Image (spheres, helix red, strand yellow):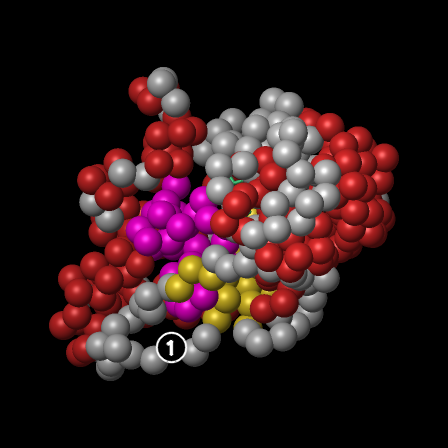
Amino acid sequence: MAQFPQRVFSGVQPTGNLHLGNYLGAIHKFVSLQDTHDCIFCVVDLHAITVFQDPAVLKANIREVTAAFLACGIDPVRHIVFNQSQVPEHSELAWIFNCVARIGWLSRMTQFKEKAGKDKENASVGLYAYPTLMAADILIYRATHVPVGEDQKQHLELARDVAQKFNKDFSASIASLGHNEAFFPMPEPLIQGPATRVMSLRDGSKKMSKSDPSDNSRINLTDTADIIAQKIRRAKTDPEPLPSEVECLGSRLEADNLVSIYAALRGFSKQDVLNEFGGANFSQFKNALVEVAEAKLGPIGAEMKRIQSNPAYIDDILRKGADRARVIAGANMAAIKDIIGFIR
Ligand code: AQP
């Protein structure tokens, strides 16, 4: 297999209510990857419009996600931060990938089934084709590593299938243009640590989600210390004390979730947490969790508000990031057009 320079790409949708799941599953990991990889972090606004967004709210949400990136410690000078719609090559490659991906592949995507619900006929075509745009987001930069939460695993597998089929379908053209055996890398998902799927605080069988109608189901990155404490104290639990071994968390979904959150916030394993809290009751454990969550998220929320008070500063970062992203995307798009046989 051809060798590709290591490059990280990941995106977050500007659909409001950024929460602890987005932080622990994605943004927190982006921050540590900055020291080891070239990174591209994208506010994926084209994905957001797969369901209707109010234009003024969308604009505010694009700035909110950018502010979250910066407040969490992403450096837009060393790395690239931009919003997807400013780089048209994402949509251009997505169309090409619509012609590479098979309907059968897309029909198996569980996220579409969940989001479209019973009324599939009324879902947008964009919601159905979402994974081919996601494949284009990653592959237009020939990115090799993609930090995401567990829920995106299936979409990543589809991106790999698309890359593989393109490389195979066009292998002769790719070779004749001197690109070794493959043009696209097989992007690797980075789904690691104790909190790859943070669950709702009200129901341990449901993912913590922006669109959950109950605000108490999630901790938003902009929640105040009081609200964070209130939500954790009200989080659903069971009557048993915490066990001492991870295996004993088994079917105790809510307990498992709170232990995972605590572990991820402290940089511990779940067993480390149980070594400390095994035998403790939930009120004791929740006090410790409140303390850690406030200490970690309080400064992020405050910094987000400070950054959001200067929209021109945010827009300037996005514009400069898009200019840099376009250079890479444009060169790759030209090569892709040559491979396919388009005249340019
Ligand atoms: N609960 C979660 N636990 C861990 N990671 C999560 N992510 C999302 N929810 C969790 C990860 O956050 C990144 C950005 O997600 P997104 O904004 O692109 O889209 P999403 O997955 O649709 O977010 P939500 O909160 O789940 O929104 P709705 O309510 O619309 O379904 C991704 O890496 C994702 O894995």
Q: Nearer the viewer, residue 225 or 325?
A: 225
Decide if residue 212 is in sight here: yes
Q: Which residue is tagged 1?
A: 4
Decide if residue 66 is in sight here: no
Q: Quadrant of the N terminus?
A: bottom left
Q: Which residue is at a point 62% across and 30% down the rendered structure image?
A: 238
Q: Is residue 259 above or below residue 173?
A: above
Q: Position of residue 52 (x, y in %)?
A: 51, 27
Left or right of residue 190: residue 128:
left
Q: Quadrant of residue 140?
A: bottom left
Magenta-span inclusion, residue 145: yes
Q: Position of residue 301 (x, y in %)?
A: 79, 46
Q: Nearer the viewer, residue 233 or 323?
A: 233
Q: Position of residue 125 (x, y in %)?
A: 35, 31
**Amino acid under disc 1:** Phe
Q: Which residue is at a point 20% across and 45% down the rendered structure image?
A: 102
Element carrying mark 1: loop
Q: Which residue is at a point 17% across and 65% down the rendered structure image?
A: 168
Q: Nearer the viewer, residue 164 or 268?
A: 268
Q: Is residue 162 above or below residue 117?
A: below
Region in magenta: 130-159
Label 1, residues with CA under 10 Å away: few <14, some 14-19, many ≥20: some
Magenta-span inclusion, residue 232: no
Q: Quadrant of the C terminus?
A: bottom left
Q: Which residue is at a point 29% across and 71% down the rendered structure image?
A: 183
Main SS of residues in magenta: helix
Q: Position of residue 111 (x, y in %)?
A: 39, 36
Say whether mark 1 is within 8 Å of ligand 1: no
Q: Quadrant of residue 116?
A: top left
